[in-house]
């Protein structure tokens, strides 16, 4: 039986698992379909499909420090897992689940892709004009971050004011220090 307490956590885990599966499936298809290195235009030059391997983070930043990005990714996944366990609403859980799924999707590449364990390059295939090439994990990360930011702003707006009673529970359980 799922209790009120475990339901948001279950939602976060289901959303994260779905994001990881979709991301990894799309990367497998891209590795097969785009292996010849060609760019497939989808919307003219504005958007297309092109296989690339990113050793760094956003826009290739940190390319020479892939192992550090892996360590940061593991720490982020651990923190997101704690946030998922503390989520109190379905909306928060879904937003954190998207971020968690995107982070795990790219972390799998870091661990399993060439050139080696914990220094693997992330598989990218969504080419945004001449700007950058990304993947579905990046989209999940961005969508989750936007969802969480919007929910934080809505929560802040609802609870703004000195004598206003909160309209709902906080998005995450308070830490033990906050309960005093």
Image (tube, grey):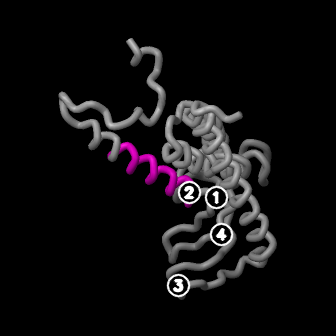
Q: Magenta: predominant secondary structure element? A: helix
Gap between marks 1 and 4 measured at Cα: 10 Å
Q: Are marks 1 and 4 in contact (CB under 8 Å)?
A: no
- Position in image of residue 19 (x %, y %): 66, 55
Distance of label 2 from label 1 (alpha carbons): 6 Å
| Crowd class of label 3 (few under 14; some 14 to 19; many from 20; radius 10 Å) | few
Write down the region rendered in magenta: 139-153
Q: Is residue 65 visible?
A: no
Residue on which disc 1 sits? 54
Residue at (44, 53) in percent of width and height: 146
- Vertical order, 11 against 44 (above or below): above
Query: Does the segment drawn in magenta span residue 146?
Result: yes
Determine which residue is flagged by label 3: 45
The disc, 2 or 3, on the residue closer to the chain's N-terminal end is 3
Q: Which residue is mark 4?
A: 125
Where disc 2 sits, the SS reads helix
For this orientation, the residue located farthest to the left is 162
SS label for mark 4: strand
- Asked if marks 3 and 1 touch (Cβ < 8 Å), the reply is no
Q: Are marks 4 and 2 in contact (CB under 8 Å)?
A: no
Give the mark toward the camera: 3 or 1: 3
Q: Earlier in the sequence, mark 2 or mark 1?
A: 1
Residue denoted by label 2? 60
Front: mark 1 or 4: 4
């Amino acid at each position: 039986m799922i209790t009120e307490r475990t339901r948001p956590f279950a939602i976060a885990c289901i959303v994260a698992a779905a994001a990881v599966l979709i991301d990894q499936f799309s990367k497998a298809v891209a590795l097969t379909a785009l292996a010849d290195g060609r760019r497939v235009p989808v919307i003219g030059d504005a958007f297309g499909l092109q296989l690339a391997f990113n050793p760094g983070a956003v826009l290739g930043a940190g390319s020479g420090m892939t192992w550090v990005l892996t360590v940061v990714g593991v720490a982020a996944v651990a923190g997101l897992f704690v946030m998922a366990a503390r989520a109190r609403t379905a909306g928060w859980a879904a937003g954190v689940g998207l971020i968690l799924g995107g982070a795990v999707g790219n972390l799998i590449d870091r661990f399993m892709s060439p050139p080696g364990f914990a220094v693997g390059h992330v598989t990218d295939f969504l080419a945004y004009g001449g700007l950058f090439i990304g993947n579905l994990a990046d989209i999940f990360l961005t969508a989750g971050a936007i969802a969480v930011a919007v929910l934080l702003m809505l929560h802040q707006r609802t609870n703004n004011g000195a004598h206003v009673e909160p309209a709902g529970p906080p998005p995450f359980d308070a830490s033990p220090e906050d309960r005093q």
